[in-house]
Amino acid sequence: MAETATLERTAVVRRGRKLEYFTVAWNSVEGLVAVIAGVIAGSISLVGFGIDSFIEVTSGWVLLWRMSVDADVHGRERNERRALRVVGVSFLLLAAYIAYESIADLLSKRAPEHSVPGIILACVSLVVMPVLSRAKRKVGHALSSAAMHADAKQTEFCTYLSAILLAGLMLNAVFGFWWADPAAALIMVPIIAKEGIEGLLGKGCNDCGAGERLFRS
């Protein structure tokens, strides 16, 4: 029974590593496209979206490390806390950047610029990120990994940021609501910061333990 549980956990870890490799590759390309398109269009929102993608790349590498040391049963809890703290720092960096850029945009009345590549990128991200987040959440639940669960939330936040970016561009283009993008982004800041603080404190998801009990049963 124990051998079967070990094999099942190994398969889940392998799935988690594949998801994180995809995360790193996707966000690297997404970040480059967003930053280049943002610089060309003079769009702070797009540049900020690209920086968020690079933060997620860092988080992805941390989770890859976490998956690579999963076989170390005795050090698993310690490694989990380390990974969770790094993901928590990523959340706080993301919250700080969004807050800074949103306030700067509101004070300067800087409207999101029109960018066809930016709109296409936001639309594609709205399709890919929810699927990726759900897949990560399943792995996190199966492995009782709060770090993977937190990474899934970070991917979920990328979905929201994509929606905010798209909404800001469209509302500004159609109705001239230049303030829609920074105002909506500011609403997300306390939510993201809360997740970051919980990560630094080592708090995990409430139901992660169910996955560990499943492997032991």
Image: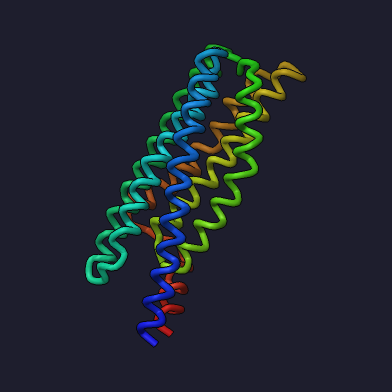
Q: Is residue 188 above or below residue 166?
A: below
Q: Horizontal placement of 69 versus 184: left or right? A: left
Quadrant in the picture for the N terminus: bottom left
Q: Residue furthest left?
A: 74
User: Residue 135, image x and y in percent?
Assistant: 54, 57
User: Residue 70, image x and y in percent?
Assistant: 31, 64
Kindly indicate the quadrant of the structure image that contains residue 111: top right
Which residue is rendered at x = 61% and y = 15% of the image?
113
Q: Is residue 12 above or below residue 216?
A: above
Q: Is residue 96 above or below residue 64?
A: above
Which residue is rendered at x = 45% and y = 57% of the image?
149
User: Residue 22, image x and y in percent?
Assistant: 47, 47
Quadrant in the picture for the C terminus: bottom left
Q: Residue furthest bottom?
A: 1
Q: Horizontal placement of 175 versus 157: left or right? A: right
**39 vs 77, nearest the viewer:** 39
